[in-house]
Amino acid sequence: MTTPLATFTTALETARTRAEAFDALGAYVAAEIGVKLFTVSTMKLEEKIARRAWTNMPDAYPVSGDKAVERDAFYEEVIDQGRCFIRNTIEEIALVFGDHELIKSLGCGSVLNIPVRIKGQFTGTLNLLDADHYFDPATVARCVALLHVPGIACFLLPE
């Protein structure tokens, strides 16, 4: 029997672009974790630009164009401190994410953003969203253990 990690690894070995790698990562997340919404964001800090580069809900929550990176709680926790950003209610999410109403309409009320660094530089985040209070400490630890290294591998491919 093939495991989700083996399937991801095979897909990653043949991926030529980040988009193909993110497709494989999305399938891996669906098989291993099964959150409602999974996206990948890329960031160019020198230009202060962020972009939603991949999503498992392209119709309801599509990839986005460039948006300005703001210095806020997300920036401090994820970019400055290199920590995961965890919020477990829509009210907490609303303090940072302007699209919180859309997030709520998708049945999501909690978020886990896992930072990705390449060569010591912040590059982007793996973003998992699900129901209120989904991301307890054990779930966060499991998500990070399963996704951190595969996420880094995906970001190593060319755009």
Image (spheres, rainbow, N blue to C red):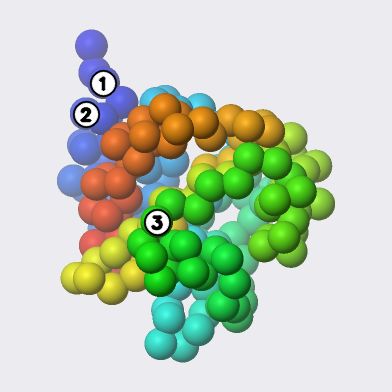
Q: Which is more foreground, mark 2 or mark 3? A: 3
The residue under the point 55% across, 64% down is 74
Which quadrant would the N terminus be assigned to in this image? top left
Relative depth, front residue between 117 and 27: 117
Q: Position of residue 13 (x, y in %)?
A: 18, 46
Under circle 1, the secondary element is loop
Type of the residue with mark 1: Thr
Nearer-N-terminus badge (2/3): 2
| Residue pointed to by mark 1 | 3
Residue 42 in view in this figure: no
Under circle 2, the secondary element is helix
Q: Position of residue 104 (x, y in %)?
A: 77, 43
Query: Mark 1 packing: few (<14 Cα in 10 Å), some, or many (20+)?
Result: few
| Residue pointed to by mark 3 | 83
Query: CA separation, marks 2 and 3?
Result: 28 Å
Left or right: where does residue 19 sit relative to residue 41? left
The residue under the point 24% across, 67% down is 118
| Residue pointed to by mark 2 | 6
Q: Quadrant of residue 72?
A: bottom right
Left or right: where does residue 63 sit relative to residue 20? right
The residue under the point 41% across, 87% down is 46
Type of the residue with mark 3: Arg
Left or right: where does residue 58 sit relative to residue 158? right
